[in-house]
Image (cartoon, rainbow, N blue to C red):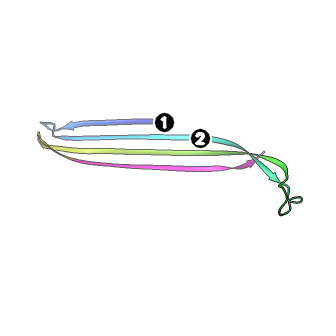
Amino acid sequence: MEATGTLGQRFGSQKRFGALIGGSYDWNGRGIDDLEPVPDQAVNMPGSPTQYEAIDIREYRYYRTRWGMAGSLDYKPSMDRRCTYMGCIRTLRILASGGCTR
């Protein structure tokens, strides 16, 4: 799921004040399938070639949420001068679950 938006406007009788704000949101649920070889603990000795007894099929699920906002304010006291303030806030959260074998 993804959403974005922006709003802006100039204010006052001579349009000297301006404001702009924008934001976005993104949620992503993705997965990774992985094959993991399982070493044979009973046979593997130091210095000998590694032997494997099985393969684990692992399924990992990642749930990622990102959002952010940005904005700016400006004031034009005259045609050749402008005062501006800008800022932003953002986050990235990753919740992972996995290690399940089947």
Decide which of 57, 40 is in the foreground and name it: 40
Q: Three-letter amino acid code at disc 1?
A: Glu
Residue sitting farthest toward the right: 43
Q: Quadrant of residue 79?
A: top left
Q: Residues within 10 Å of mark 1 (few under 14, many from 20)?
A: few
Count all numbered tags in the image, as a single digit: 2
On whether residue 95 falls in the magenta region, the answer is: yes
Which amino acid, mark 2? Gly
Label 2, residues with CA under 10 Å away: few <14, some 14-19, many ≥20? few
**Residue 23 location in percent, x, y?**
39, 41
Label 1: which residue? 2
Query: What is the quadrant of residue 4 in the picture?
Result: top left
Q: Does 36 appear in magenta?
A: no
Give the quarter of the image for residue 33: top right
| Image coordinates for residue 74, horizontal then vertical, percent | 21, 44
> Is residue 81 shown left or right of residue 5?
left
Please give the name of the residue rendered at 67% of the width and 46% of the height, measured from the top-left corner.
60
Q: CA distance from mark 2 to mark 1?
A: 12 Å
Give the residue pinned by disc 2: 29
- Name above or below for residue 41 compared with residue 31: below
Magenta region: which residues?
84-102
In the image, what residue occupies the spot 61% across and 40% down?
30
* Callout 1 secondary element: strand
Name which of mark 2 and mark 1 comes first in the sequence: 1
